[in-house]
Image (cartoon, rainbow, N blue to C red):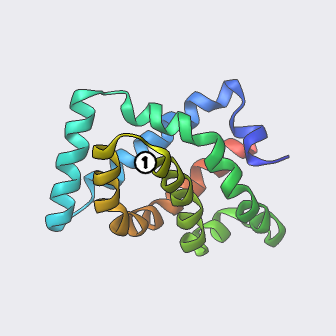
Amino acid sequence: MGLSDGLLDANKRDMVVADCTKLIDTQVASMQGVSGLAMKAGYTAIRGLAPSYCAGAIAMLLPESLAALDPIWSEGIQTGDPVTHLTQNSDRTADALLGITDAKIERSKNKTVRGVYNKLRNSAKKHVEEAVPGLAKIIDNYSKS
């Protein structure tokens, strides 16, 4: 059974989305420095204009994200510890997830969104890698039940 089979179940999907949204909230809140201030300001602005935007984006990207992570997670199951495996392979995990958003942005007709994404893309990988341990725990939590 793949990740999508278990985590997109109607009983789990909303909880997975809620936990992933909380993970992003926590990650953004912990950012420091000038780039952290900019990210916090942008995130606050988005949440102020459209409070459910992030949860909606996560819900939209979740099926493709789980499909992209499934091979790495399956390797981890073979080793006996998929959470550790995903975390130890945070570089591959981040590339898999960002590949999905890269493709979506490439198809976007909104030049403003593409421009903002392209400006933030280089620093995004580091932030996604930092979130992988939390994401791995969320996946583990819902894939067991």
**Which residue: 68% across, 25% down?**
11
Query: What residue does disc 1 label?
Result: 23
- Compared to residue 118, the image places residue 54 above or below, namely above
Task: Tell me where residue 80 appears, x and y as whole percent.
Answer: 79, 68
Q: Residue furthest top?
A: 10
- Quarter location, residue 51: top left
Percent position of residue 136, x then y: 59, 57
Q: Which residue is pictured at 35% across the width and 40% down the height? A: 110
Badge 1, how many Cα within 10 Å: few under 14, some, many 20+? Answer: some
Residue 1 image position (x, y, % from top left): 85, 46
Report whether 6 appears left or right of 131.
right
Q: Residue 140, relative to residue 71: is it above or below?
A: above
Q: What residue type is labelled 1?
A: Leu
The mark tally for this picture is 1
SS at badge 1: helix
Measuring 55% from the left and 59% from the top, which residue is drawn there?
Answer: 99
Which residue does the image show at 73% across and 56% down from the upper left?
70
